[in-house]
Amino acid sequence: MLRLRGRGGRMAAQVLWAVALLPLGLNVSHLLASGNVYILMQHALFLVYLVPMLLFDGAALTPADWKVGGVLVKLLCGFLILRNILCANGAYVYTKLVYDNTARQMTQIMADVGKLDGYEPGTTPVAFVGSFTDSQLAYHDPAFSRYEEGDLHQVNSAVTYDGTIKWWFQHVMGSNAAVIADSGTLIALGETPAVQAMPLYPANGYCAMVDGTAVIKLSD
């Protein structure tokens, strides 16, 4: 433990230096995490504000000083715990809303696909062209804007890319739809004139049969 045995000027300098370490600590955590920094990862770094208390010589402090210091520590820890609880609960609620929104819209989309002439469940290839997160299928609510693509790296769609589409249909929807999960195939299909001419979800005509494939156009 560091102990301060100098005068007030030295103590003040060390306190200021300790507090100044916070931005550096935040940047270091950002570097070590390769840019994927979550709010919960940063909270512990705020404990650097407790470092000045470690710089005092315990023998020089009166019982009253220790009492005041103890109260300050409890208040700060209480604040950090409350922030963690609010952040975690908010992230959970946002994730649940995104999940429910995706499930509702995907159910409606597949109902529309089932009405297409020539579509056979489990046999006809199904292609979702475009980005889920950049489409009208994505969940948006100003009340939860801090969680959308923010420090928590939450996303606005439970299905985010072609690699998750099969999992979603199999384990969430319990569907045997023959969804295409190859990005190269989806990109090539999206560049065909027929798909280019299609409107975006949820406009009329957003899903259609194109060369034997049920295509759902989410975005350009």
Image: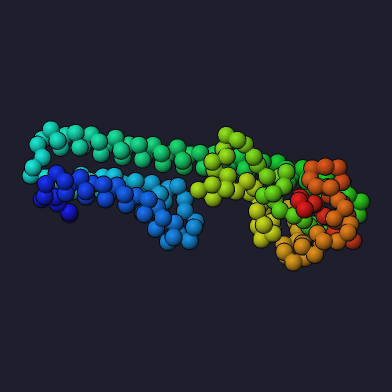
Spot the residue most to the right. Answer: 117
Q: Position of residue 63 (x, y in %)?
A: 10, 35
Q: How is the image coloured?
A: rainbow
Q: Is residue 53 left or right of residue 180?
A: left
Residue at 65% over, 53% down? 160
Query: Which residue lies at the image location 17% right of the left edge and 54% below the top edge?
Result: 1
Residue at x-position 64% and y-position 40%: 140
Quarter where residue 2 is shown: bottom left
In the figure, 218 relative to 184: above or below? above
Does 191 sit left or right of 37 as displayed? right
Image spot of residue 202 (x, y percent): 79, 42
97 relative to 189, above or below: above
- Taking the view exactly as shown, the residue that stands out farthest to the bottom is 184
Residue 178 drawn at (x, y percent) = 77, 59
Residue 77 appears in the figure: yes
**Image-quadrant location for residue 27:** bottom left
At horizontal 70% and vertical 41% (from top left) the residue drawn is 104
Determine whether, in the image, residue 186 is placed left or right of residue 95: right
Question: How many numbered marks have been drawn onto this rendered protein structure?
Answer: 0
Quick check: can you spot residue 212? no
